[in-house]
Image: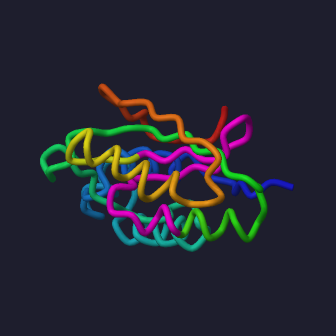
Amino acid sequence: MSDSVELSTVDLRILRLLQNDARISNKDLAAEVGIAPSTCLDRVNRLRELGVITGQRAEVDAAKLGRPLEALLFVQVRPHRRALVDSFVEHLLALPEVRAVYHLTGPDDFLAHVATASATELQRLVLDELTARDEVARVHTNLVFQHWSGGPLLPPG
């Protein structure tokens, strides 16, 4: 069973434009797509109601916020059980250094993208917030030299 929804070519054009610039005005969006502003607003609201558009957020430069060192932390937890997973994710998301958390398959259970002020702060995060927890069996840390974001996400085909 799929959660995907049927989208028209106009909907896809709206999604492409909004993913490139979520601050575009409805008037400009409508003009780019070639529909009336009222129709455009209805379509955007429909995409929100369907859960296709799930939010808008500002992208920030971690270094300019005093967190120039980014890392990917691969974490293995034991035992890997629902109650433990939920509480561990809640713990990670409460940490100010954590930018994203992914639940994985394979040898590692989680991937946490973090941003810290220094290598010392990264070490503190790993030792005090992760390996100090009983359920954490292993943490593997990779530093991020640089990252790129992909283009707009659209359905296959």
> Can the viewer see residue 48?
yes
Screen quadrant of the N terminus: bottom right
Which residue is most to the top?
A: 145
On whether residue 47 falls in the magenta region, the answer is: no
Q: Residue at x 73, y 35 (%)?
A: 106
When asked about the image quadrant of residue 111, the answer is top right
Q: In front: 90, or 60?
A: 90
Q: Residue at x 68, y 62 (%)?
A: 85
> Can the viewer see residue 34?
no
Instruction: Say if 68 sits above or below 130 in the image.
Output: above
Screen quadrant of the C terminus: top right
On whether residue 109 falls in the magenta region, the answer is: yes
Across and down, in percent, residue 7 comes to 63, 53
Instruction: Say if 56 sits above or below 110 in the image.
Output: below
Q: Residue at x 27, y 48 (%)?
A: 121
Across and down, in percent, residue 68 comes to 20, 41
Q: Which residues are magenta?
A: 91-113
When asked about the image quadrant of residue 36, the answer is bottom left
Across and down, in percent, residue 122 comes to 32, 45
